[in-house]
Amino acid sequence: MSNQIETYIDVKLENRDQISVLFRYVLIVPVAIFAFAFAPGGAESLSVGMGVIVLPVLLAIVFRGVYPSYALRFNQAILELSTRLTAYAVLLNDNYPSIEANSSVRVIFPDVEGGKKLNRLLPLVKWILAIPLYIVGAVYTIYAIIMLIIGWFAIIFTKDLPQVVAEVLFGTTRYWNRVLGYAFLLVTDEYPSFSLKD
């Protein structure tokens, strides 16, 4: 098993629902409101993963060498919800994002063995060490937005999402999940790859 967060999305390329794609950003509002309710600071908290538990986990790892199991389950559930929203918003599939776990989008955390596998001091500096990841991620995000626009028009006119567009959108989603796992969710000490393919 990988030492990074693994993201699985059932990507649909052909015979897409043009009507839902046309109104996708209106349709997503109710689930987005539900998801934003977990973010203590509102929309600005999205940059650190929509209301995940960060500070208590950091303190538990640094002072006790433990990753609380309830925080791990909560963080995984919130990241899965965020990933379901992302998959729907960036046109990777037509499955309306459920507020419950489902098999079309899965996020698997590495086994932290209750925190025993984690360095106790590294959580204090991971967010700084991740600065190059943020910069590369910003470039990937701009690239993904361009591909999203191309994909949107492709679905509207042909009912198909081009494979290359899906790869970029899915790769960017996986990339940001790995960065969140390292820098904020603190589930791994392994530095994430800069690649969209991993």
Image (cartoon, rainbow, N blue to C red):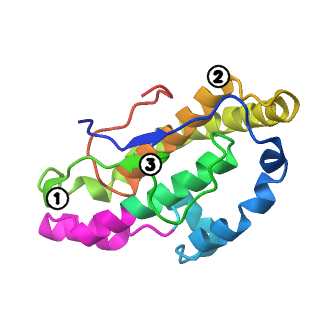
Disc ID at residue 89: none
Where is the N terminus found, in terms of image quarters? top left
Where is the C terminus found, in terms of image quarters? top left
- Check disc 3 and report the residue beneath it: 103
- Could you say which is closer to the camera, residue 124 or residue 14? 14
Question: Is residue 56 magenta-colored?
Answer: yes
The image quadrant of residue 129 is: top left
Q: Nearer the viewer, mark 1 or mark 3?
A: 3
Locate residue 155, reporting x and y percent: 80, 33
Of callouts 1 and 2, the N-terminal one: 1
**Three-letter code for the amino acid on which mark 1 is drawn:** Gly
The image quadrant of residue 184 is: bottom left
- Check disc 1 and report the residue beneath it: 115
- Could you say which is closer to the camera, residue 79 or residue 137? 79
Residue 177 against residue 85 in the figure, above or below: above
Please give the range of residues in magenta.
51-75
Asked whether residue 128 is in view, the answer is: no
Q: Secondary structure at mark 1?
A: helix
- Could you say which is closer to the camera, residue 7 or residue 116? 7
Report crowding for label 1: few under 14, some 14 to 19, many 20 or more residues within 10 A (C-alpha).
Answer: many
Question: Is residue 180 magenta-colored?
Answer: no
Residue 144 against residue 195 in the figure, above or below: below
Outermost residue, front direction? 15
Of callouts 2 and 3, the N-terminal one: 3
Locate residue 143, reporting x and y percent: 69, 32
**CA gap, disc 2 to disc 3?**
21 Å
